Image (cartoon, coloured by chain):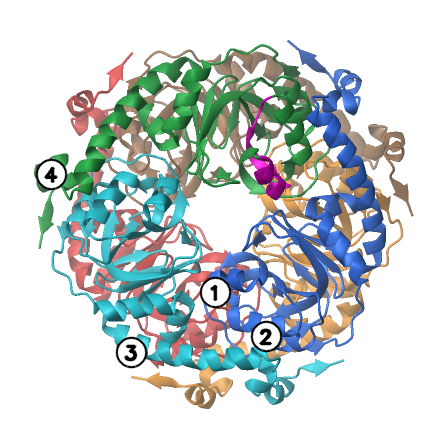
Chain colours: A cyan, B green, C blue, D red, E brown, F orange
Amino acid sequence: MSVVVQNIPRADAALIKRLGAAGVATVHESQRRTGLMLSQMRPNQQDRSIAGSAVTISAPPGDNWMIHVAIEQLHEGDIMVLAPTAPCDMGYFGDLLATSAMARGCRAIVIDAGVRDTRDLRAMGFDVWSTAVSAQGTVKETPGSVNIPIVCAGVAVHPGDVIVADDDGVCVVPRAEAETVMTEAQKRLDAEEAKRQRLASGELGLDIYDMRGRLAAKGLKYI
Amino acid sequence: MSVVVQNIPRADAALIKRLGAAGVATVHESQRRTGLMLSQMRPNQQDRSIAGSAVTISAPPGDNWMIHVAIEQLHEGDIMVLAPTAPCDMGYFGDLLATSAMARGCRAIVIDAGVRDTRDLRAMGFDVWSTAVSAQGTVKETPGSVNIPIVCAGVAVHPGDVIVADDDGVCVVPRAEAETVMTEAQKRLDAEEAKRQRLASGELGLDIYDMRGRLAAKGLKYI
Amino acid sequence: MSVVVQNIPRADAALIKRLGAAGVATVHESQRRTGLMLSQMRPNQQDRSIAGSAVTISAPPGDNWMIHVAIEQLHEGDIMVLAPTAPCDMGYFGDLLATSAMARGCRAIVIDAGVRDTRDLRAMGFDVWSTAVSAQGTVKETPGSVNIPIVCAGVAVHPGDVIVADDDGVCVVPRAEAETVMTEAQKRLDAEEAKRQRLASGELGLDIYDMRGRLAAKGLKYI
Amino acid sequence: MSVVVQNIPRADAALIKRLGAAGVATVHESQRRTGLMLSQMRPNQQDRSIAGSAVTISAPPGDNWMIHVAIEQLHEGDIMVLAPTAPCDMGYFGDLLATSAMARGCRAIVIDAGVRDTRDLRAMGFDVWSTAVSAQGTVKETPGSVNIPIVCAGVAVHPGDVIVADDDGVCVVPRAEAETVMTEAQKRLDAEEAKRQRLASGELGLDIYDMRGRLAAKGLKYI
Amino acid sequence: MSVVVQNIPRADAALIKRLGAAGVATVHESQRRTGLMLSQMRPNQQDRSIAGSAVTISAPPGDNWMIHVAIEQLHEGDIMVLAPTAPCDMGYFGDLLATSAMARGCRAIVIDAGVRDTRDLRAMGFDVWSTAVSAQGTVKETPGSVNIPIVCAGVAVHPGDVIVADDDGVCVVPRAEAETVMTEAQKRLDAEEAKRQRLASGELGLDIYDMRGRLAAKGLKYI
Amino acid sequence: MSVVVQNIPRADAALIKRLGAAGVATVHESQRRTGLMLSQMRPNQQDRSIAGSAVTISAPPGDNWMIHVAIEQLHEGDIMVLAPTAPCDMGYFGDLLATSAMARGCRAIVIDAGVRDTRDLRAMGFDVWSTAVSAQGTVKETPGSVNIPIVCAGVAVHPGDVIVADDDGVCVVPRAEAETVMTEAQKRLDAEEAKRQRLASGELGLDIYDMRGRLAAKGLKYI
């Protein structure tokens, strides 16, 4: 049963933008340390920090047909998130598909598989997080689905979830929790700034967080 | 039985250059998706796309003696391709050997093992694709062979085959097929340019490649 | 039994600096090819070559409490070396801890686990060698130890050992051997320069090292 | 937010038993090739084929406290399914916990981490599928959750889903689909028996499935 | 270009049988330590030592159509050797295909991918060496080839080569060298028996092989 | 500098035997969860639980010469522990070396590399824990050392340390701590028996260990 779900809800664009600015580590902490993809999910470029709405793709191993189908469903600011139905490191995605996706306003893909034309993708400004780089070609024989729940690099992703991605990796924020998470993230960002200044001045975390007593109680000895 | 085959045929230099410009993904597709090394074979530098004739090296694990032997066999434009006879991530190759290879006109190595002095190699403009980076030193105790058929990162390589390498990885073109492959690659490059323009203008692959009927026939449903 | 050893001996600062300049490959060779960490230990930045005194951290998996404890023990020029007590790729270290460490004069960490805020760490000039990048948060529940002998990425490290790290990876020099190793390293550096010139001029290693006879004796044949 | 969901729906016991008898390969095929855990999930024993209702456990890496909590929630025939919140191969589970679980009627665990006392577990008849074997001890410091949705070895699991496990691995059947899947599985089992006899008699799949024409149409040539 | 080569030469049956009895380690040594597949290639059963003629299968990732085609080409005593054209751990092969292969006189498969129904395969006496166990289903959409040269688990295999497989793994003997290799293997087996008796009586390899002088010359010191 | 240290202290034989009977999990817990080798270290046989004194071997990758040297140093009840100086999965050890070792009273090897003749080794009753099975042959060209400190599968091992090994893996007990560890282990074994009976009768760990209050305090909620 291959389906394309055509109308998916998305989070508020301004909220998505703020989550992207907060970055993966902060957002992940702000939702109780959930949603982080496995560390094998690595960026194809450096120094980028983005967020967008997930258009999910469930594809057979070695078959990239569904990307063509998914591109039609893309809105401005979406991020494609592709998981093969079995582990596969083949090159599902390259510069031609990126050209097509960019024409629809999409500028990033997160893929638990391989990509190719990696230099061109960097030059085009199309951001990629993938678990492999491979030129290995795929077929177009078996349909999969678009905008169904998937598991990508160890994390459940629903269509419309907010994807946050930077040099540290990729974090998934459930759409319904995006606002709560951002509120918590903002608190952390504000608090971090104050802490950063104290730490930079030479104060120790041991004192700022009042850890010495608890460490001693747990048996830590200085010799 | 350790041998050095001294005279190997090579493909035409202009043809090799064109294959390098076409790049790994296109060349791989143009020879029916064969010849691509495993995705663990990664570049030591970014934004390089080259091609050359393979001088093959079969070396014992942890023994780099044969590289000295191979260097004498190098011609202008050759690429060394080394496979250890058992899996090994030690550092077979560094800046001194690169200096020697460059003096013979060779500017790249493809190695299913480790390299070292990686910063120097980038600075010297000596290109490397390897499955590991490691400073671990090797010995010079057991001869191997030069210019015999090897299997490197999952692909059979014969001496004189054309090696194409870029940011996506490494592809091997059998020497006898190089011209046919380039002819096919040129067709693809020409066709891609036209497609790229249509996709950039917003046309969909679904329509350009007339996929909708076949997808429906295979059971894809829109909901 | 969790302990913090507060006063550790360190090698001479000028000596440490010279080892850093010599680099991982040369230093590793100069101590009879020992001390190199596994090749999974990779830098977070390019084109850096440093050395420092090891402040060792033994931490429970997924628990970064001991880094706060270790920071108090840091001296100018130290490098933190952290090994979890079981394999773990979580993000033990990020920009706030780096801010605190830098305030104590430490500018690098070597960690057999994950780090986060990798872009910020590069921007701050805080050097990192790690076996993973991950934003996954850690707890502060179980004490470990600081400045005890550890095994990090396959190598035994004692507090005060000299850590040498560059693009090739990380090498550990036992403190008591640092001077001997540097003497040997200097000899290699001097000899390498002469060899480099001969090799660059086109002389072959086969001749410079007089290998032809020994290769023939071991059965190498030219055909 | 750590929670224990106490009352979860379960599938019919007779239905579960039939799914266990059908086995992983058949069940997986019968739900359109979904639900199979990654191939790293391996059995601790040979020649067992079971099924049960999932009691899910989300546990911090290196912390097995929640297993004690989960055991209280077990019913006769349940299977514990544990996923750490970050990759971890430590030994969460051994013979004492198995003794406790067996007293509640549970005879199996599926765990995306390590187990220990593996010989005792086999001797006790407590079945285990795990991604590692490790004696490494865990702590009891941080609560997780019981009977919430988790992702285990690449597959989303909901409490009460039917877990089917044998020598081939582990497959998850959503509770609401269990009956439909079993109906389909029975059809396959019946059909397989007839096919097996024809194949055993020497008839070819090429003829039974009438593949020759389609293969020729796709370009297969005999030479 | 998908092809089936229908008539392949095979080695002499008695010779093949002797190679199987000699076992992987001896045969591998007897052909100058070549031909051994990667150590990821593991048996599905214990205590089997076999040999047979390779019927090679090149299959697309996740597509097992070619196994049906290959079965028609099998002769008594053949072993199927399958390599996917890109890394893939899906379950290409199970009990129905084994039933069909056995009807043609084939009793083993060597596959650089996954198999399923592993318990049934052991019960049927159908031997398997594979790089994975997985129930993940495959499609039948894209033809590959039968009896062309392939690379399987790091080794080049030609149709008709002799495959030797036991608990240690799989070794490939080029057909044309099978007799020479067996002659050498027999010498080793004869010599080993004598050595075994001397070693069992307490004589040391150091003395039997006269190693002490050479070790001292290379710098070994007793302290 | 290759050395053989000829006289090493060993722990008391009766004590060693008791540690072997206690098993890896208990011993590892009894020394504060230290000393466990990585989970890649797997047994070649089932249902064995042994202990012995470590005779350590540091060997070059792919060179098994030092095993011959080590065998001369073996005493009744010793276990060889071999670590290559760089990662290597080649087959260092097989039935002939086992025959020789058994003649000296040694019945087991722990090796961070490959072994071969695995079926014969099981038949002979020679126990093996290794990180690989491989028939790949090694050379005898470069000396290493015997009875020096090594790091094997992530753990520091000194000659004379007690090695405990069973189906769960391998644990290293520093010789000087062997008696203290066994005293602690005996306490655990005695306590475990009482706990096992309570758990078997249906009492919960939650109650036996009085966990409910602490879980609630840490925020666990039942719903």
Q: Is residue C176 visible?
A: yes
Label 2 belongs to which residue? C100
Label 4 belongs to which residue? B207
Figure check: C52 above or below C6: above
Judge from the rendering whether residue F149 lies leftward or rightward of residue B221; answer left or right.
Answer: right
Q: Chain of mark 1?
A: C
Task: Return the residue nearer the eye: E156 or B45.
Answer: B45
Figure check: E135 above or below E35: below
**Label 4 neighbour load within 10 Å: few <14, some 14-19, many 20+:** few
Question: Hey, what amino acid is under mark 1?
Answer: Asp
Residue found 24% across the figure and 50% down from its top: A58
Question: Hey, what amino acid is under mark 2?
Answer: Ser
Residue found 50% across the figure and 27% down from its top: E155
Label 3 belongs to which residue? A180
Q: Assess whether mark 2 and mark 1 are in contact (beta carbons under 8 angstroms).
A: no
Q: Position of residue F118 (x, y in %)?
A: 60, 39
Label located before the other in sequence (1 or 2): 2
**Label 3 neighbour load within 10 Å: few <14, some 14-19, many 20+:** few
Judge from the rendering whether residue C142 lies leftward or rightward of residue C173; answer left or right.
Answer: left
In the structure shown, which secondary structural element does the residue marked by tag 4 occupy? Answer: helix
For the record, the magenta segment spans B105-124
Label 1 belongs to which residue? C117
Q: Position of residue F84 (x, y in %)?
A: 69, 44
